[in-house]
């Protein structure tokens, strides 16, 4: 279970450039929840992910994962239990290392922080995991990751983030930089891995169709706040135009409240 309690993030606090990116946000995810998050640029979506994963300092509030307080933990400590993918396929892998070496690093997550010798048994685990991607990478273990396509790298990064099953998976527009066909393939692969491992997952997307298609909840964010939380039953009855209309209505209402405040 993920619990975010009264979370606030303020950048450049006390300066003329001060900006409150997250405003007293509260959120609970149950085990196995797959939540898609939509919102305009600057709504605070990626900042929320950063605050949860530890690469953005929290100004106020707390973050708990399965009852453990993560609030003051360093990012590398949280990474033992949190997998994260970014929009840029170049992030999340070491391009000058081979596929096998990248997988070995992710396989050691939570145990040690350097590339150690790995066994024949480990290699078998890597090949079997790569076979599930259905990209032919299981026969290219010694290929440098930097030579792979964007879609192949993102699929590999997804595998690396889940090779040791995390307690929470954060997908930060992880298909936005891919072409439509590759994006669809990586999204279907993401769903398959999430369902097989019963992973608690949050996925940021600007694609309303994907927001409706994937997951069991939709969160709408605006001005650093969650302005709507759509449950599985309501989500089933919605079309893209319904979702767009609701987002427009609640965003405008939120903006009016801020102006009055």
Image: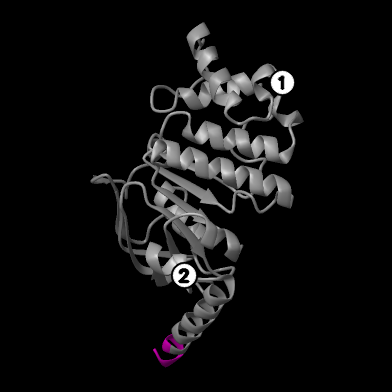
- Relative horizontal placement of residue 157, taking residue 27 as reference (left or right): right
Secondary structure type for disc 1: loop
> Quarter-wise, where is residue 229 in the image?
bottom left
Viewer-side label of 1, 2 = 2
The first of marks 1 and 2 along the sequence is 1
Tell me how the rendering is colored.
one colour
**Residue 31 location, x and y as percent?**
31, 47
Above or below 132: residue 59: below
Q: On residue 143, which mark appears?
A: 1
Q: Which residue is drawn at 50% across and 14% down?
A: 122
The residue tagged 2 is: 237
- Whether the magenta-drawn stretch holds residue 258 is answered as yes
**Magenta region, residue range:** 257-261
Q: Let me know if residue 85 appears in the view.
A: yes
- Whether the magenta-drawn stretch holds residue 220 is answered as no
Above or below 245: residue 89: above
Disc 1 + disc 2, Cβ < 8 Å: no
């Amino acid at each position: 279970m993920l619990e975010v309690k009264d979370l606030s993030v303020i950048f450049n606090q006390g300066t003329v450039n001060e900006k409150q990116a997250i405003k007293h946000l509260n959120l609970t995810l149950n085990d196995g929840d797959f939540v898609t998050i939509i919102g305009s640029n600057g709504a605070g979506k990626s900042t929320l992910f950063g605050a949860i994963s530890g690469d953005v300092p929290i100004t106020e509030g707390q973050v708990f994962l399965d009852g453990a307080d993560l609030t003051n933990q360093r990012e590398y400590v949280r990474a033992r239990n949190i997998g994260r993918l970014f929009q840029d396929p170049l992030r999340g892998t070491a391009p000058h290392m081979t596929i096998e070496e990248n997988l070995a690093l992710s396989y050691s997550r939570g145990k040690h922080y350097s590339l150690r010798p790995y066994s024949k048994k480990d290699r078998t685990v890597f090949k079997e995991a790569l076979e599930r991607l259905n990209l032919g990478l299981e026969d290219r273990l010694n290929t440098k990751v930097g030579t792979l396509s964007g879609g192949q790298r993102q699929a590999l990064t997804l595998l690396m983030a889940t090779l040791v099953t995390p307690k929470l998976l954060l997908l930060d527009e992880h298909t936005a930089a891919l072409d439509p066909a590759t994006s669809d393939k990586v999204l279907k692969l993401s769903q398959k891995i999430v369902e097989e491992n019963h992973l608690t997952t949050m996925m940021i997307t600007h694609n309303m169709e994907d927001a409706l298609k994937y997951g069991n909840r939709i969160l709408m964010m605006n001005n650093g706040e969650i302005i709507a939380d759509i449950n599985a039953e309501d989500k089933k009855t919605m079309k893209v135009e319904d979702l767009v209309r609701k987002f427009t209505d609640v965003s405008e209402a939120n903006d009016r409240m801020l102006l009055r405040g």
